[in-house]
Amino acid sequence: MHTDVERCVRAVRSKDARFDGWFFTAVVTTGIYCRPSCPAVPPRPANMRFLPSAAACQQAGFRACKRCRPDTSPGSPEWNQRADLVARAMRLIADGVVDREGVPGLAARLGYSTRQIERQLLAELGAGPLALARAQRAQTARLLIETTSLSMADIAFAAGFASVRTFNDTVREVFALAPTDLRARAPRSPQGGTTGALTLRLPFRAPLNPDNLFGHLAATAVPGVEEWRDGAYRRTLRLPYGHGIVALSPRPDHIACRLTLSDLRDLTVATSRCRRMLDLDADPVAVDDQLRTDPVLAPLVDKAPGRRVPRTVDEAEFAVRAVLGQQVSTAAARTHAGRLVTAHGEPVTDPEGGLTHLFPEPAALASADPESLAMPRSRRTTFTTLVRRLADGDLRLGPDSDWAETRAALLSLPGFGPWTVDVIAMRALGDPDAFLPTDLGVRRAARELGLPSTPAALTARAAAWRPWRAYAVQYLWATDSHPINFLPA
């Protein structure tokens, strides 16, 4: 979008928050860059430059605006609706792969050369993977500076910097303030220590309807791993350097996030995965405008706009749970998953009580006795084949997954039909166009709304909803009285 100058100027003049994260405005006369909704008086169009990423702004020598804090913008929705090389690379960078494995590690995961990845990221985002990762480290550092009492040396290494000197230089360059000055300007008093809880605000593009989002997560919560308590969805997180516990609560203009981490180096990854689970980088206006073109869906959208697709923090975990949920009720699926957690999950300590385990890794489930699984023999075969393939690395599910290739790999497994593959594509892989024409809830809603109820006919009708059929499923499900559609009391 940053190449459409006229459209960008209109967005800046109207201070339209919907475009935050789509592009950034660099002001040549002041040397700062802002989000489109910056409350400051807009500069003259001749003094504006529009860039596709914060990293591109930083590479061009601009520093972040202290008023609108462009580093806290929602992410671009482009990376959630595409599965090409650039989108997959951006999802991996957000997951901290460059910080942990370097650019060669990123290239190895994507199956391309480092040169090809550099070239494509530069062409589309104006910055390479190292610059994009550096911008992310700067944002993490600012968050830790302003919300913890950690020493600056601890913050430097927790944010992923190789040295305190690099940390100091980057913070001064990006924010035009020394780290100590950033802390002095922070509006909140420092909290916690090295293992204390961090309180964050996760931004999103309005509107956001939390009912089906949190309702789905709460209604399907696995005992010991997830719970709904005091208006918050809580769950344990398996992270690269340790584990964590997160509590997420919907607010009118943000999601309140409280994180307890065993290792602060996991902060960026934990935040990214929570945003992905809640689909916070979606563009609800684009989605809803497309679905409103269908006269059957229009009243559903107008009644409760801004529905998101409830996703996951662990793709392999969700695939296992999808198999456990085949042809059984939500309650039965929770029971099956809870038994696996008790038998094979890794125990954790929850300071608030209630959560007891991390969901078992595929390797732990692969060693389980199939006869101990309370399910039909055919589903046992499906389950054991899946966890063995995941444990061996023959099947990889993650933010870097190619949607088409992964669908084909899943369909080749015994017991994997269209419903299982599509629900994994929708909620684990993040495909916004995944569709469930054989789902019981979708077919029931179709009959009540006068839509075709057979899978083939409904799929043909749903072609008009592309590329947002996963969101159409949320609106169809919402016609039912199932607990997944309601924010818990």
Image: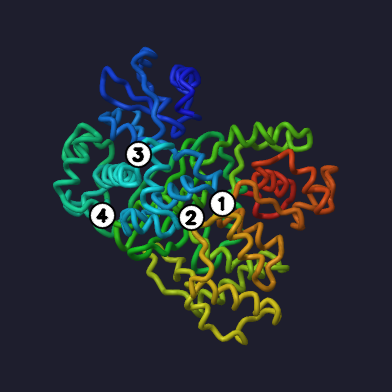
Residue 338 in percent (x, y) is at 56, 72
- Label 1: how many residues lie within 10 Å, few (<14), some (14-19) or many (20+)? many
Please identify, in this view, whether the residue under mark 1 or under mark 3 is nearer the observer: 3
**Residue 430 circle label:** 1
Q: Earlier in the sequence, mark 4 or mark 2?
A: 4
How far separated are the C-alphas under marks 4 and 3? 23 Å
Q: What residue type is labelled 4?
A: Ala
Structural distance between the alpha carbons of marks 2 and 3 = 20 Å
Which residue is labeled 4 in the image? 158
In the picture of the structure, the residue carrying the numbered disc 2 is 399
Q: Given the image, on which type of amino acid does mark 2 rest?
A: Pro
Dot 2: element: loop
In front: label 4 or label 1: 1
Q: Which amino acid does label 1 sit on?
A: Gly
- Label 3, on which residue? 127
Q: Is mark 1 on a helix, strand or loop?
A: loop
Give the residue at x 62% y 87%: 371
Pointer 1 or 3: first along the chain:
3
Picture disc at residue 201 = none
Give coordinates of residue 278: x percent, y percent: 52, 48
Residue at x 49%, y 66% (from the top left corner): 225
Out of 96 and 89, give the one closest to the viewer.
89
Display colour scheme: rainbow
Circle 4 SS class = helix
